[in-house]
Structure formats: structure tokens, C-alpha cells
């Protein structure tokens, strides 16, 4: 999957334009967010009412008269472009262009996270925070599930891979899952105030992981 991602990013895919080459082509940074990442219906119980039980990632903006999904996507794209300007091969799921009839969205997200040097979940304040918890929890359960993670959080031994995961949230986001991200999985949780701050946090984390690969105890993935 790593090589497929690297090969696909310079090509236009669906609604996503081809991405320009970066200096660190082999250093993949997968950016996730509450926008076209998961088929939430598939994560709900079979007896759930999609109309009432599914979390919404949309909030109504009275000034513009539009929902906020486009703002979320714009934040993800701006963060991606900012990281790419700094040389990191950052991407969104939609940039890879794998058809959903080949691999569903949830499976794609798990595969992209497993293939990447860094996985960052950006959680702005939009809609029902339950949705944030569903996405973060599902991915962490899948990519970080090991024997050491069974049982109570206090007894859990997170795998080394948790060091490659960061959750960036706005200060107003509240979710029990966000507390569990650090308590159970020992992953990094940080807050940002605007797009520039978000990019700065993400770039700092990517640089830290890159240094850990070069000089520390993390294995290089290239």
C-alpha cells in the first residue's frame, strides 16, 4: 500500500488534483478528519435508525447559509498543502483515488494509517462530537489492536505504533474518546486555534517522528 499511495499522489484522482512532488516522498503523513473518511452507517448497530442515530459532522453557519463540511475539508487541504510545502508527503484519503467498490472507506483509512509514517486526526468543532469518537476509536482499535491492549486501560501496553499517531483538536471539542486516546492508547493529543496553528503542530510532530526514525528508536519505513 505504501508504494501505491506514493505512486498515486502525483496523479489526479476524482475531485482531487494531482499533488506536486515533495522532498521527502517516502515520509507519508495521512491526515484524517470528519469528512469523507468513514462510512458512518457501517459503524452503527444494525438496528440503528440512520436518520436519528448517526452523528452529524455538519453545523449550520448562519452568516454564510451553508453547512460546514466544506470548511472542514478546506482545513484538511490547507494543512496537507502546508505540510507538503515543508517537504512531507501529506495526503488525504481522497487524494489516493482508490475506488470504493474495490475497498470501502473504513478499510482504506486503516490501510493508509498502517502504511504511513505519521497519522494525524484533525478534529475541529463540527456537529456531534460522538462522530469524532467513532472515527478515532475505530481506527485506533484496528491499527493498534494487540494482545497488550486487552483489558483495562490502566493495564494496557500500547504498541510502538501509537507514537506515530497524533490527534489535533480545537479547544472546544469535547469527547470521552479524546481522553481515552491518551489514557488508553498513549497517543498524542494537542489543541490548535486556527489553520496556521494546526499546520505548525502537525509539522512539529512530523519532524519529531522523522528524527526518531533517523536518530531514535523508531524503525524507518522507507
Image (cartoon, helix red, strand yellow):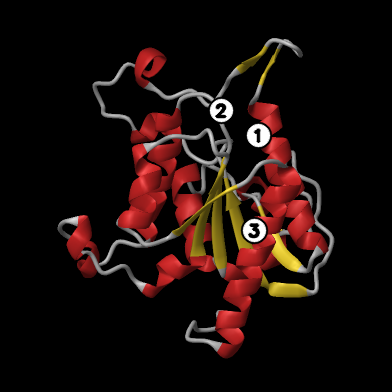
Relative height, residue 73 to residue 118 (above, below): above
Q: Which of the labelled discs sits on residue 126, or is there none?
A: 2
Determine the residue positioned at 64% across, 50% down.
Answer: 92
Residue 222 appears in the picture as rendered: no
In depth, the one of 30 and 217 nearer the eye is 217
In depth, the one of 139 and 218 nearer the eye is 218
Residue designated by label 3: 202
Where the C terminus falls, by quadrant?
bottom right
In depth, the one of 143 and 83 nearer the eye is 83
Determine the residue positioned at 22% across, 57% down.
Answer: 153
Question: Closer to the observer: label 3 or label 1?
Answer: 3
Q: Position of residue 108 (x, y in %)?
A: 50, 51
Mark nearer the N terminus (1 vs 2): 1
In depth, the one of 103 and 74 nearer the eye is 74
Q: Which of the labelled discs sits on residue 96, or is there none?
A: none
Q: Is residue 96 left or right of residue 57?
A: right
Relative height, residue 211 to residue 19 (above, below): below
Task: Please rate how many residues cluster around mark 3, counting C-alpha atoms within 10 Å: few if below 14, some from 14 to 19, many from 20.
Answer: many
Residue designated by label 1: 72
Instruction: Look at the numbered discs 2 and 3 and tell me whether their residues touch, using CB distance below 8 Å.
Output: no
Mark nearer the N terminus (3 vs 1): 1
Relative height, residue 4 to residue 199 (above, below): below
Badge 3 element: helix
Badge 2 element: loop
Mark nearer the N terminus (2 vs 3): 2
Residue with the most extreme left position: 151
Instruction: Look at the numbered discs 1 and 2 and tell me whether their residues touch, using CB distance below 8 Å.
Output: yes
Q: Is residue 46 left or right of residue 119?
A: left
Amino acid at each position: 500500500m505504501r508504494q501505491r499511495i506514493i505512486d498515486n499522489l502525483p496523479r489526479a484522482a476524482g475531485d482531487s488534483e494531482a499533488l506536486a512532488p515533495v522532498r521527502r516522498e517516502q515520509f507519508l503523513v495521512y491526515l484524517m478528519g470528519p469528512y469523507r473518511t468513514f462510512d458512518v452507517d457501517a459503524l452503527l448497530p444494525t438496528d440503528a435508525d440512520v436518520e436519528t442515530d448517526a452523528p452529524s459532522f455538519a453545523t449550520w453557519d448562519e452568516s454564510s447559509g451553508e453547512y460546514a463540511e466544506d470548511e472542514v475539508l478546506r482545513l484538511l487541504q490547507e494543512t496537507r498543502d502546508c505540510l507538503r510545502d515543508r517537504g512531507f508527503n501529506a495526503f488525504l484519503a481522497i487524494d489516493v483515488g482508490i475506488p470504493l467498490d474495490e475497498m470501502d472507506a473504513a478499510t482504506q483509512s486503516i490501510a493508509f494509517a498502517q502504511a504511513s509514517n505519521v497519522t494525524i486526526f484533525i478534529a475541529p468543532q463540527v456537529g456531534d462530537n460522538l462522530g469524532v469518537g467513532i472515527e478515532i476509536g475505530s481506527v485506533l482499535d484496528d491499527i493498534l489492536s494487540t494482545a497488550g491492549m486487552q483489558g483495562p486501560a490502566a493495564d494496557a501496553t500500547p504498541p510502538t505504533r501509537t507514537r506515530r499517531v497524533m490527534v489535533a483538536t480545537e479547544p472546544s471539542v469535547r469527547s470521552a474518546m479524546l481522553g481515552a486516546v491518551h489514557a488508553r492508547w498513549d497517543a498524542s493529543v494537542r489543541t490548535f486555534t486556527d489553520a496556521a496553528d494546526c499546520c505548525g503542530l502537525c509539522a512539529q510532530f512530523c519532524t519529531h517522528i522523522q528524527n526518531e526514525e533517523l536518530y531514535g528508536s523508531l524503525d524507518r519505513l522507507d
